[in-house]
Amino acid sequence: MADVILDTNIIIDYLSATREQHVEAVNVLEQLLESDVYEPVILAAGIKDAYYILCRHFGGKREELVRERLDAFRQVVSVAELTCDVIERAFISNEPDLEDGIVRATAELRGAAAIITRDRGAYESSSVPSMTAKEFLQRMV
């Protein structure tokens, strides 16, 4: 199966029903989980980032819920480790944001089929194509 890397913003969209792109994130994850061709992959670092952002979003009042939902989410997708190779490649990449460099490095080192993101400006120089959830679903069919 070919890896499809889910950017942190897709994880957050999926886990937060109030986000504008929630439905698209749910649709893409459902299709990926049903696919015999693609494997949804998140970064271990993305779990930490999503936890931090969601706890801030809910004002820390729902930390236990955020933890439970992230734990359930990570159990249905593959989790890519943050390795020294990934970090080294991220630091030398031309991505202006280190987090994006880590996503890109993970995708390239794993030979991923795509990076699904809402950040249109990121990953333009990556050898792995990036696209929105909606674009990926259109190409997947």
Image: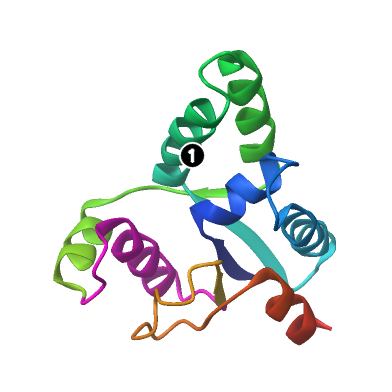
Vertical order, 32 against 18 (above or below)? below
Is residue 73 in view from this perspective?
yes
Q: Secondary structure at mark 1?
A: helix
Answer with left or right where residue 131 lies relative to residue 95.
right
Q: How many marks?
A: 1
- In the displayed structure image, the side of residue 29 where residue 86 appears, left or right: left
Task: Between residue 115 and residue 51, name the one nearer to us.
Answer: 51
User: In x, y percent, where is residue 21?
Assistant: 70, 58
Q: Image quadrant of residue 134? A: bottom right
Q: Position of residue 81 (x, y in %)?
A: 40, 47
Q: Who is closer to the viewer here, 51 or 77?
A: 51
Magenta residue check for 95: yes
Q: Is residue 47 magenta?
A: no
Query: Which residue is drawn at the image coordinates 76% and 62% (left, top)?
Result: 24
Q: Which residue is mark 1?
A: 47
Q: Which residues are magenta?
A: 94-113
Q: Is residue 88 above or below residue 115?
A: above
Residue 1 visible here:
no
